[in-house]
């Protein structure tokens, strides 16, 4: 089972609507499964074929699911792609887009099946494919952090939205071809993706969403990051400008990162830092700014982001022993990566920590050693 759960895409709005939609879907499913809402009472909510057009079903059918795995798979991917899309739109625009895709897709589906004698459909899959297509248009090179569960083992890795979306779309296209283009779930998924792709493109062209030159069209044209690369033309150096300071754009980005931290938008601050790392030559947070962001990420329990930032901090400031100890602690206690934690701690020689932290270091080593017996294999072990 593949579980995409986080993203490095800039998140300027917290996923309130995404979480709310997930909650509604879950509550409806539990109500029907438990009998609190009798199945016969919910039956009229299904999108029915061959019985005319029923606009209310264009909304209600999207909140019904055929089973637990159907619900689980949809909600996992709604969370991953909803983070990206709502992160750019905000909660009410995202909700409008979410319901809009559902209404358009279900209306088209029911109209196409007016001649059917029976049948129907339910579930949020088509909408989620639409949201995935929007994320593909807006943030193809951003990555999703994924967990791959195989039996009783799991592996973690990052994959770009472009690659993951293309894989899923190709699966649906191949399935449609194998089924001789028959009407089925793959066609419904692709119709949702087509609506989402068109809507994402429209909002981008209308400039209702700003992807800062990292959208799919800019990437395909080789213009990715074009806006970030546009710098104010440098004036000729004078005798008073022999040592240039940071660019205006970098100063503005740093000010924005500090503002986001102060406002509690920690993940947004990290996403902006990561984006600047990719697009701005020589970008580096100062040691105090980096420590401040690390602290806030840890408080927010954003473990993957905090690990990535701590690794970068140690590369820039190798003597940051407290950060190294905290990194080892997160690896052991939150990520269950004992081998990597032990490797991190090998660069903490005796005496490098204050005496008050030595017991913590020794306890972590013992904890990692014990955990390593239970987790014999890790996907990778890097030289941090």
Image (spheres, grey):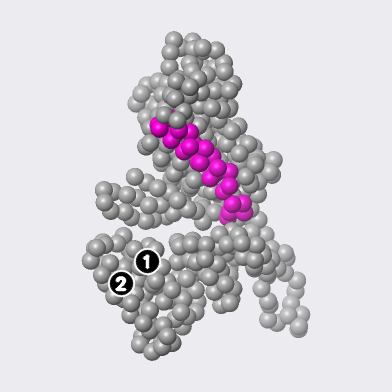
User: x, y (%) of residue 238?
Assistant: 76, 80
Say whether marks 1 and 2 touch (CB < 8 Å).
yes
Instruction: Tell me, yes or no, whether the highlighted magenta stretch contains residue 319.
Output: no
Mark 1, Cα crowd under 10 Å, few <14 / some 14-19 / many 20+, is some
> For the image shown, how many numbered marks are present on the structure?
2
Q: Mark 1 and mark 2: span between their CA atoms?
A: 9 Å
Residue 270 position (above or below residue 101): below
Determine which residue is flagged by label 2.
Answer: 367
User: x, y (%) of residue 222?
Assistant: 56, 51
Q: Quadrant of residue 281?
A: bottom right
Q: Residue at x 26, y 48 (%)?
A: 151
Quadrant for the C terminus in the image: bottom left
Q: Quadrant of residue 229?
A: bottom right
- Asked whether residue 58 appears in the rendered view, the answer is yes
Q: Residue at x 58, y 70 (%)?
A: 283
Residue in front for this viewpoint, 93 or 165: 93
Mark 2, Cα crowd under 10 Å, few <14 / some 14-19 / many 20+, is some
Quadrant for the N terminus in the image: top left
Q: Which mark is residue 333?
A: 1
**Left or right placement of residue 263 versus residue 363 in this view:** right
Q: Residue at x 37, y 46 (%)?
A: 2
Q: What secondary structure is the stretch in magenta mostly built from? A: helix
Q: Residue at x 51, y 30 (%)?
A: 62
User: x, y (%) of residue 249?
Assistant: 68, 65
**Secondary structure state at the residue bearing disc 1:** helix
Residue 26 position (above or below residue 9): above
User: x, y (%) of residue 298?
Assistant: 50, 66
Q: Quadrant of residue 264?
A: bottom right
* Span highlighted in magenta in the image: 10-34
Residue 5 position (above or below residue 119): below
């Amino acid at each position: 089972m593949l579980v995409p759960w986080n993203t490095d895409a800039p998140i300027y709005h917290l996923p309130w609507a995404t979480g709310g939609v997930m909650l509604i879907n879950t509550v409806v499913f539990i109500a029907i499964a438990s009998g609190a809402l009798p199945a016969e009472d919910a039956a009229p909510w299904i999108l029915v074929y061959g019985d005319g057009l029923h606009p209310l079903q264009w909304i209600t059918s999207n909140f019904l699911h055929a089973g637990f795995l159907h619900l689980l798979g949809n909600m996992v991917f709604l969370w991953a792609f909803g983070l990206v899309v709502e992160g750019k739109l905000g909660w009410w625009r995202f909700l409008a887009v979410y319901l809009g895709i559902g209404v358009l897709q279900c209306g088209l589906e029911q109209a196409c099946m007016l001649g059917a004698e029976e049948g129907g459909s339910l579930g949020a899959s088509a909408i989620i494919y639409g949201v995935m297509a929007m994320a593909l248009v807006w943030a193809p090179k951003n990555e999703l952090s994924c967990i791959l569960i195989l039996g009783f083992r799991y592996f973690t890795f990052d994959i770009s939205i472009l690659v993951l979306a293309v894989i899923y779309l190709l699966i649906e296209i191949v399935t449609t071809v194998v089924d001789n283009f028959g009407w089925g779930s793959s066609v419904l998924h692709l119709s949702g993706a087509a609506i989402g792709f068109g809507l994402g493109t429209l909002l981008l062209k209308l400039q209702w969403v700003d992807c800062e030159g990292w959208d799919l069209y800019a990437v395909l044209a080789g213009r990715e990051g074009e806006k970030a690369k546009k710098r104010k033309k440098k004036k000729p150096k004078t005798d008073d400008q022999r040592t240039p300071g940071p660019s205006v754009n970098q100063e503005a980005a740093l000010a924005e990162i500090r503002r986001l931290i102060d406002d509690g938008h920690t993940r947004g601050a990290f996403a902006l830092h990561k984006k600047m790392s990719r697009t701005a030559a020589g970008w580096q947070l100062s040691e105090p700014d980096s420590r401040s962001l690390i602290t806030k990420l840890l408080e927010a329990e954003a473990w993957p982001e905090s690990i990535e930032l701590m690794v970068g901090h140690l590369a820039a400031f190798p003597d940051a022993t407290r950060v190294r100890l905290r990194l080892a602690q997160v690896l052991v206690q939150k990520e269950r990566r004992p081998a990597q934690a032990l490797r991190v701690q090998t660069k903490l020689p005796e005496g490098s920590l204050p005496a008050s932290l030595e017991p913590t270091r020794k306890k972590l080593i013992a904890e990692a050693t014990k955990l390593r017996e239970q987790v014999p294999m890790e996907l990778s072990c890097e030289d941090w």
